[in-house]
Amino acid sequence: MSVSAVVPAAVARPSRTLVCVPATARAPREMAAELGAAAALGADVAELRLDCLAGFAPRRDLPVLLAEPRPLPALVTYRPKWEGGEYEGEDEPRFEALLLAMELGAEYVDIELKVVDKFMKLVSGKKPENCKLIVSSHNFENTPSAEELGNLVAQIQATGADIVKIATTATEIVDVARMFQILVHCQVPIIGLVMNDRGFISRILCPKYGGYLTFGSLEKGKKSAPAQPTAADLINLYNIRQIGPDTKVFGIIGKPVGHSKSPILHNEAFRSVGFNAVYVPFLVDDLVQFLSTYSSLDFAGFSCTIPHKEAAVRCCDEVDPIARDIGAVNTIVRRPDGKLVGYNTDYVGAISAIEDGIRASQPTDPTTSPLAGRLFVVIGAGGAGKALAYGAKEKGARVVIANRTFARAQELANLIAGPALTLAELENYHPEEGMILANTTAIGMHPNVNETPLSKQALKSYAVVFDAVYTPKETRLLREAAECGATVVSGLEMFIRQAMGQFEHFTGMPAPDRLMRDIVLTRT
C-alpha cells in the first residue's frame, strides 16, 4: 500500500511537533521529580519509562507517578528487553500495568506492534477517551525501503493505534530521507525517528515534515536511545519550536562532526537576524550520495569539513576561482535553480587571523603583509592545508609543506612551487629562526588532546604557531609553543572568520560579527 493511501486517524496532528523528555530514574519519586525538571526545560510531554524502575510495583508506584496535578502530560512506556528496553518478565503483568496507567489518567500509552493484538484483547473498550494509544515498532538493524515503511504504517494503523511510532537505525545518513518521505506524506499522526549518529537529523528536522513528537533527554548521559539530543538543545540550540515546512536547512558535512561548534554559532546568528533556517550536523560517509539525496531547494547550504573539502570541488556545479585554485571547498550554496556553488572561506579566515596575531605581538610594516618573505611551514596537505598554503603564498610567504605521507606533501608543494617534507623530517628542520608554523591536520583534536604534530624541542625554531584545531581551545601544540616563547594563534580565530564568510554566502546578509565572536569565545 502506498503511504498516501493510509486512512486518516481520528487523532489530529498537533500544531507543532511535541518535545518529549524520557524519565529514566530508578526510583518512583525520583522519576516523578524528573517530570518537574522536564517541565522546567519547556518540554511538552514526559515519557515514564517504567522498565527503568528498580522493584517496580504498579499499584504502589503508578499513583505516585501519575498523581494530579502533573507538571506535564505523561506518556507511559514499559519497554521489554526484546524491543530495546529493560523489562525481562512476562507480558501479562506489563499489560496490566499499562491498563492501570490508562485508568489513572495517562495521556499516552505505548505498546509494541509485536504484541498489540494481545494487548488490545485486554483493553476491550476500557481505554479512556483522553488516552491516546501509541503503537510502536523499533528496528535496531537498518531503515527499510520507503515502500516497506509505508506498509508498516498501514499495518500499525490497522491495529487501532491513535498514533504510529516507527524508529529505525541509520547505516548511512541518506537512510533518514526515507523517513522524511514517510512523515511528509503520512495522513495519520506519526512519530518517525532514525537512531544513531547518522540518524541524528531526524530528531531535529521532524517538525519540518510533520512529525508528531520527538524525544530529548533531560541532560547529557540520560538519553533513552542512541544519539538522542538533550531537550535543552532541541529547544534552545536548534530552536525546534520555530522549525516548520518553510524552514531552510543548512549544516556541516564531515566525519567526524559531533565536535563541531558550527551549529551553536550559525543557529544563534540565524535567529538574531530573523532568518528562517536551522543548522545541523551531517555525519556523511559518501558526499556524492548525500548531495544527490538531499537535493531539494530546502537543503540550501553546507559547510564542509574533514574529510570532504577536496571532494566538494568535484561535487559542485560551479566553483569560485579562488576555491578552484586552492583545490578545496568549505562552503556550498544551493542556488534557486538547484545548482551547487562552492566557495572557500578558510583561507581568508586563517591568513587574516595569523596576520592580526603577528601585528598584535610584533612590530610590522603597515604597508605590507607580515607574512611577506617569511618561511611559512604548513603541516597537512588536505583541504585546510591547501587553503593555508595558497593564502600564505598570495601574501608573499615562502611556503613549505610537511605531511605524514610524503607523496601528498609533494603534490601540494608542487602546486605552490615549494619544498615538501615528511613529519619526521620536520622534527630537524630549522634552516632559519623566526619561522611560522600552521597545523591544518586533526592531530590534537578532542578526544586525542595529548597528541601534537611536532615536538616541543622542534617548536623552538618558530616565532609564530597557528593551530586550526579549536577543540580544545588550547591544544597541546599551542600550549607548548607559548612555553617556547612563540606568538600563538588559536584555531578559534580562523573558525570565527570563516564562519562569518559562510553566513554571508548562506543568507546574503552581513554577518553579525560581534555576536558571532561572543558566541564562540564565551559560549562554546
Image: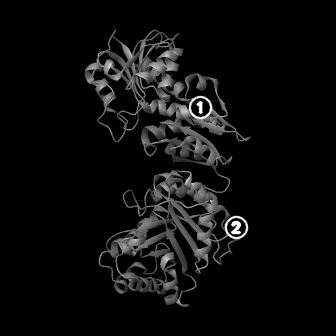
User: To which quarter of the image does residue 362 belong?
Assistant: top left
Residue at the disc numbered 2: 4
Residue drawn at x 63%, y 39% as measured from the top left: 506
Residue corresponding to mark 1: 313
Q: Is residue 360 left or right of residue 280?
A: left
Image point 43% across, 62% down: which residue?
Answer: 225
- The amino acid on which the numbered mark 1 sits, given as a three-letter code, is Val
Q: Is residue 202 above or below residue 292?
A: below
From the viewer's perspective, tell me whether residue 94 is left or right of residue 127: left
Q: Quadrant of the N terminus?
A: bottom right
Q: Position of residue 160 (x, y in %)?
A: 59, 81
In the depicted view, which residue is nearer to us: 28 or 146? 146
Up-down: is 69 above or below 185? below
What is the tally of numbered marks visible in this picture? Answer: 2
Image quadrant in which you'd find residue 90: bottom left
Q: In the rendered structure, which amino acid carries the disc numbered 2?
A: Ser
Q: Quarter of the image containing the C terminus?
A: top left
- x then y, percent, for residue 33: 37, 70
Q: Earlier in the sequence, mark 1 or mark 2?
A: 2
Query: Where does the image place residue 492, in percent across and percent down from the top left?
Result: 44, 33
**Which residue, as the protein is rendered here, is positioned at the far left?**
457
CA neighbours of label 2 inside 10 A, class few (<14), some (14 to 19), many (20+):
some
Q: Secondary structure at mark 1?
A: helix
**What secondary structure is marked by label 2?**
helix
Residue positioned 45% across, 64% down in the render: 40
User: Relative to residue 74, is residue 417 depicted above or below?
Assistant: above
Identify the image quadrant of residue 9. Answer: bottom right
| Mark 1 crowdedness (10 Å alpha carbons): few <14, some 14-19, many ≥20 | many
The label on residue 186 is: none
Q: Is residue 500 left or right of residue 58?
A: right
Residue at 31% x, 21% y is: 424
Viewer can see residue 273: no
